Amino acid sequence: MLQIWILLLIFIGSFNLASATVQCDKKIIQVSLNLNDTGPISYPIVTWFCWKNGTVLTANQTIHLTISGFTYDHTYWDFPYQPYNYSYINYVIENSNENIAVLNFDRFGVGLSGKPLFASTITGDVHAFVIYQLMEKLSQGYYHNISFPKIVLVGHALGTEIALIVASNNVYNQYVCGVIATGFLHLINPPSFASFFASLYPAVDDPKFKNQLVPADSLTTNPNTTQRQDLFYNIQDADIKVIDKDEQLKAIGSASEFTVARLFIPIETRNIPTTIPILIVMGQRDILSCDLLNITLSCNDANTIINREKDDYITNIEAYVLENSGHDVNLHRNARDWFQAALDWSNKLSFQNCGCSK
């Protein structure tokens, strides 16, 4: 009899787990881009609209639109290794009381989405225009025939820079209700960035991409060096299997998209209206932006981050520091701590006067 009860409890537990799984619909949308001033061309962008099984989707759901960083695709936000620990999408959907759905996608030029002939034609502004068109689709009922007016941009590194360009543009930001900005501060750690640039080499020379059709001038991190793990991770707070999986999943990038976004954002962020609040999330040991030996580059706690960034915004900013984490906050052992911080921040947004409500 005891064995029967044990088996029954296991069955019930398995049923509850299955009923709470996240469902994602893959959809390809066409975006119009004029890359060479020769007229607009249509390119496919592959998207995944994700929500909790059993949820009745309505316009009341908040949509987190996730934007990956340099040399990352959509898998950064839905990491396939131990997703319980490392998937932002799984966590926020499972724990949002059915209030949040996520639109994840491969950026233009990355993963399954369309690629130009030359990667150098991809800039921060090009990415921002793609985000604007994705938000239009959300607003116009392209997904599940529902117009979703509550959109929060969630970016990492380059993805954050793209989100901030969108938020600062008076046309693009009409749909934006908030920004969760991870892995980006205005003041960088120059030696670490120099090391990062030194780690890049032509993607066509990389074993992963040599048999793939990628733009000839695209870049990726060199697997024959340790810079990717050294710069993106605090090894003491990361699983080596995650780091290995990260190498397997890495994507391509271009020098133009990386440098253009970083050059102009310190000016543009002051143009983000007060109707778009921002949550800044940093790894405490993100050596691309932080230096524990330098007080001006400290990322020790939230107050330190706010003091570093407050002069670069007129809108309200809050901060969260993921203890002991390196640059890739999604891929450290305690990633779920910042996932919860993002969820808490998103849940308290009023959505009354943001750009999407105008």
Image: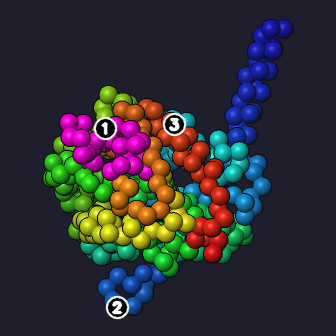
Q: Quadrant of the N terminus?
A: top right
Compared across the picture, whether 306 is left or right of 6 comes to: left
Instruction: Report the disc number at residue 336.
Output: 3
Label 2 neighbour load within 10 Å: few <14, some 14-19, many 20+: few
Query: Which amino acid lies under the numbered mark 2 shown in the image of this protein?
Result: Thr
Residue drawn at (66%, 64%), measured in percent from left and top? 352
- Mark 3 or 2: the one toward you: 3
| Nearest to N terminus: mark 3 or mark 2 | 2
- State the residue position of label 2: 38
Element type at mark 3: helix
Query: Which amino acid lies under the numbered mark 1 shown in the image of this protein?
Result: Arg
Residue range corresponding to the magenta coloring: 280-308
Instruction: Report the disc number at residue 47.
Output: none
Residues at marks 3 and 2, CA–CA distance in whole angstroms: 46 Å
Residue 348 versus residue 277 in the image, above or below? above
Residue 224 versus residue 101 in the image, above or below? above
Question: Do the residues under discs 3 and 2 have CB atoms within 8 angstroms?
Answer: no
- State the residue position of label 1: 285
Q: Can residue 127 be seen in this view?
A: no
Residue 82 falls inside the magenta stretch: no
| Nearest to N terminus: mark 1 or mark 2 | 2
Dividing the picture into quadrants, the one containing residue 206 is bottom left
Compared across the picture, whether 69 is left or right of 338 comes to: left
Q: Which of 303 and 331 is in front in this view?
A: 303
Residue 334, horizontal then vertical, whole percent = 46, 33
Q: Nearer the viewer, residue 353 or 285?
A: 353
Residue 217 versus residue 203 in the image, above or below? below
Compared across the picture, whether 151 is left or right of 338 comes to: right
Q: Can residue 322 be seen in this view?
A: yes
Element type at mark 2: loop
Question: Do the residues under discs 1 and 2 have CB atoms within 8 angstroms?
Answer: no
Compared across the picture, whether 220 is left or right of 65 comes to: left
